[in-house]
Image (cartoon, grey):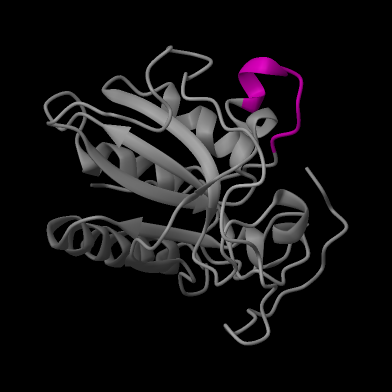
Amino acid sequence: MSFWNRTVEMPNADSALPGRSELSYYVPNVHHVNANPLQGPFPDDAEIVYVAMGCFWGAERLFWRLDGVYSTAVGYQGGSTPFPTYQETCTGETGHTEAVQVVYLPSEVSLAEILKVFWEEHDPTQGMRQGNDMGSQYRSAIYTTSDEQLEEVLESKAMFEAGLAAAGYPAVTTEITPADTFYYAEEYHQQYLAKNPAGYCGLKGTGVTCSI
């Protein structure tokens, strides 16, 4: 991933890049790993949650490997610029973070199991960075799609934050809010580490267990 961006402040809607009115690149609708739809339609009983934990290449791989996860995709979320590109997001001037869309079947995998992976596999206390990846696009975030999800996420945050504090870590900086528009990333980013097994992954957890 790119290390050249060092913007760590969020732009407001007036100062963000203007973007565009529609997608400017092709996005496939077949998951490279499991051949399920990338953009839908999804099963009627599926639920969706969006997570951001630094570089989205490695983050996406964590979730497509989970039994019960039907589909994953990477994209841009939480900012102001409509239909941003990767290059624009990397400037820090769109406000978006690198997010993963996780489509899961609650009958096969619980939200708690997904959240356990989320909390344990990165450091959610670093603000606008994740390890050497610095910038607003690398911030930790969870974007929910129901009131029940939001309640469970907040409860899991409180639980994990207590464990982090006991281990000497500062407060959690994860952005937690109902989901806004998710903009799918360019084709080459989708399931990147399946296509490029030796590709970059900077994810590193804290060693603290999330006892959900």
Residue 149 appears left or right of 88: left
Q: Main secondary structure of the magenta part?
A: loop
Q: Which residues are magenta?
A: 192-201
Please name the residue shown 43% across and 12% down the image: 35
Residue 144 appears left or right of 207: left
Q: Position of residue 53 (x, y in %)?
A: 54, 51
User: Relative to residue 173, is residue 43 depicted above or below?
Assistant: above
User: Relative to residue 44, is residue 160 depicted above or below?
Assistant: below
The extreme front residue here reads 21
**Is residue 39 visible from the viewing direction of this image?**
yes
Task: Based on the picture, tell me whether residue 123 belongs to the magenta stretch.
Answer: no
Q: Position of residue 75 (x, y in %)?
A: 55, 46
**In the foreground, 126 or 133:** 133
Q: Position of residue 8 (x, y in %)?
A: 71, 75
**Is residue 119 visible from the viewing direction of this image?**
no
User: Relative to residue 115, is residue 171 depicted above or below?
Assistant: below
